[in-house]
Amino acid sequence: MKTDTPVTIRRSDYAPPAFLVDTVELDFSLDPAATTVRARLALRRNPEAAPDAPLRLDGEGLALLEARLDGAALPPERLEFGADGSLTIQDPPEAGLLETVVRIAPEKNTALSGLYTSGGNFYTQCEAEGFRRITFFPDRPDVMSRYTVTITADRALCPVMLSNGNPDGSGAAEGDRHWVRWVDPHPKPSYLFALVAGDLVNVHDQFTTRSGRLVSLNIWVRRGDEDRCGHAMDSLKRSMTWDEEVFGLEYDLDVFNIAAVSDFNMGAMENKGLNVFNTKYVLASPESATDGDWQGIETVIAHEYFHNWTGNRVTCRDWFQLSLKEGLTVFRDQEFSADMGSRAVKRIRDVRGLRAAQFPEDAGPMAHPVRPDSYIEIDNFYTPTVYQKGAEVVRLIHTRIGPAAFRKGMDLYIARNDNQAVTIEDFVAALQDASGVDLSAFMGWYDQAGTPELAAADRYDPATRRYTLTLRQRMPPTPGQPRKHPLPIPVAMGLLGPDGAELPTRLEGENAVQAGTRTLLLDQAEQSFTFEEVPAPPVPSLLRGFSAPVRLKGVPRDRLRFLAVHDTDPFVRWESGQQYAASVMLEMVAAQQRGEAPGFDEALAEAVSNTLAAAEADPAFAAEALLLPGEGFLADQMEVADPVAIHRVRRHLRAEIGRRCGAALRQAYGALADTGPYRIDGRSIGRRALRNACLAYLAAAGDAALAKAQFDSAGNMTDSLAALSLLADTDGEAREGALAAFHARWRGDDLVLDKWFSIQAMAARPDVIQAVRALYAHPDFDLRNPNRARSLIGAFASGNPAQFHDASGEGYRFLADAVIALDLINGSMAARLVGPLGQWRRQSAERGALMRRELQRVLDTPNLSKGTFEKASKALA
Ligand code: ARG
Ligand code: ZN
């Protein structure tokens, strides 16, 4: 929707819906250019709303053909159309059957919200506010209705026609058309409605639930993609089993359909009984998908399936409660993936992701609480804060009350709130009531934006053998929240003796010692914890498993080195190595800024050698430990970032390590070569990750031949792409040849071609901006396809900080040009991509001025979408 004065929606303004809709019948007559939608809504006034509240139905871009109330046509004077496309019925009855017929044009819908076409097939995306682009309706999650959907279409164009729930009949219609009916017995909000129709084929399987329900499982794809659905289907069945075993939650319909579409704004959508997925999270073959893609599919399939209970059966009262379903469901998918593979490695990856995306968001202009207070465009709040930090907050409570009480609390949450639209208070109340633990202070995590900083000081008294640990928390202000109060921070910890052995601990006042990790609860600005009978000055290991989403600051380097080697907690071992490297690298950046020659810290090379020597035990963990902290992570720790200096330092360091550890790296690289057939299991994935980490160091040290050899002989996408991304950073024939060969081989596969665009957009080369502009004009580039837009524009602006922040400002100009062009097509995608320009406060004054200029240019564009307006105006505020 285009508007000049976008309205801010506030959480404090919530009012219950004026009318409820108990049942909905929808009749679709599908046609790409002119689809008609007949809707019959059984309406009644909500006893909980104001008695005179108007009957207002949301709508957007709908051409109304008919409107009847209880069978009688509504005269024009009783219909009032709002500037936003809504429809208000004057003198509404207390209850009645409202029937409307509207016409829409799916093939013209480039925003991919509502009903649209992709490759000639029909798909819907309704979350958050897309249903109003299909029919007039109170399009808000606290209006839950039972749906009956009849779809009619040309038999040849749409042999397959799907909607939510269970199938309920089909037959022939006029001419070459046919119809099917779907009935969803479960009441649901409109955002969970879905329709998919077209020339699709299915991969079929089945699952019997614990209580004996036989469920038909189907993945619907375009002809030719059937043989790439096996992993998605396996992941689905594993998710169904896991949710029964871990949460006691069973599937509740006779069919579970998944449809994959290549034009999709997001990853996937949990529509009741008919999930719609971006093809990226369904289709995979060993030749075409990387190990990362493989893991992404498992996670996203699980995530959407888990929504069936956390989101669908129990849904959100309003969109401010979004994390009620998203934070909780991410927590559930994280736990699932941890159970399917290595828990430690999964945790490391999740924390890496949180720091790369959520910490910067919390430190930038769009910082918002996990439960936001206001929004202009709700689409802008499907954020790392709502999802990933939301999951961390659920984890905090899980840690605080323990797994058994958490499970009891989840049971209670679902029993109390089934088939209702509820709030985050309802969730926390269930966990509190089931555990008997007062969780009121944890609400602060939902209400306060920003990342707390945690610092520790300690003192050992040899005379009394007492050890006192003092923890402090501090939170910097965020937009709209100048003052913060302390939050409850569970600090999982242990003490290590001078020899590196874990010490049993006993806190002052306790009668018995405790072995292993224990959790301290810091809920004041500062608190001291005294341990008794500590034999020698210990080294504290803090925040084990990353027990809270905070920044632990000021751990001295000697302790980081000690912990990286000795700690019993794999997360802290990894983390200490990363923090050590980060501290060295930030010092190198400072030296570089002073114009000094970069030094080298021998300890880093030593750590690489040690990691390689011990890698056999857990190659996936070793691969994580080998990676140097990312450029974004380093920038996020600087008052004023210097992306170019950071990039130089990281490159220099990688080359130095590659040279100094060359023999060990080469040896490991050779030893890790895949001998047997290609396999996708945790260990094989870990070995490939480790081998490619070795290759990257060797390439950084100048050995492009090895990368070339790997590219030429690779039998899987992981190895091929790892080599290609290294070659893309080099000069000369090997680079051009490899890129051309890759394009020639994969030009027919959109998902792989996306990778080809991304690799070039993220290359560490001085001419990248020109290359990106040329790719933007490439015949295979298509701004209308979200995956392709992300693969070039998003990859460049978010994945190539040194080039994006080039002092010329050309990177910023390119992004603004692309955002302005995209906003006309798909405002939600444009709003998503404009983000990196908002980080100008963290850049130098010169860069900041250039970034602001481009933001202003975006903001000055006529008819800007609400979403892009919100992002650009908040960034400039
Ligand atoms: N609920 C979906 C998921 O997390 C995401 C849908 C987001 N849609 C949007 N328009 N932002 O799985
Ligand atoms: Zn979700």
Image (cartoon, rainbow, N blue to C red):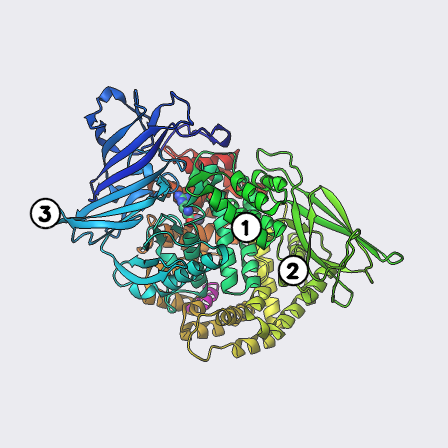
- Amino acid type assigned to the residue bearing label 3 in the image: Gly
Q: Position of residue 629 (x, y in %)?
A: 59, 58
Q: Is 731 within the magenta?
A: yes
The front one of 133 and 18 is 18
Answer left or right for 66 relative to 132: left
* Crowd band around label 3 with a 10 angstrom C-alpha radius: few (<14), some (14–19), many (20+): few
Element at label 3: loop
Question: Outermost residue toward the right?
Answer: 463
Please give the residue where the numbered disc 1 appears in the rendered image: 408
Q: Secondary structure at mark 1?
A: helix
Please provide percent x and percent y for residue 484: 64, 36
Mark 1 residue's CB less than 8 Å from ligand 2: no
Q: Residue at point 71% right, 55% down? A: 555
Residue stretch rendered in magenta on the structure: 722-733
Query: Which residue corresponds to mark 3?
Result: 175
Disc 2 residue type? Val
The label number, if any, that marks residue 292 in the structure image: none
Asked if the residue at tag 3 contacts the one at tag 1, i.e. Cβ–Cβ closer than 8 Å, the answer is: no
Give the mark toward the camera: 1 or 3.
1
Question: Which quadrant holds residue 441?
Answer: top right
Q: Locate residue 344 relative to residue 763 in the image: left or right.
A: right
In front of the other: 299 or 405: 405
Q: Residue at x 66, y 66 (%)?
A: 604
Disc 2 versus disc 1: nearer the observer: 1
Quarter of the image for residue 678 reads bottom left
Q: Secondary structure at mark 2?
A: helix
Q: Is residue 707 left or right of residue 261?
A: right
Label 2 CA crowd tier, 10 Å (few <14, some 14–19, many 20+): many
Q: Nearer the viewer, residue 714 or 858?
A: 714
Marks 2 and 3 sit apart, C-alpha to C-alpha, by: 68 Å
Near-viewer residue (618 or 785): 618
Q: Earlier in the sequence, mark 1 or mark 3?
A: 3
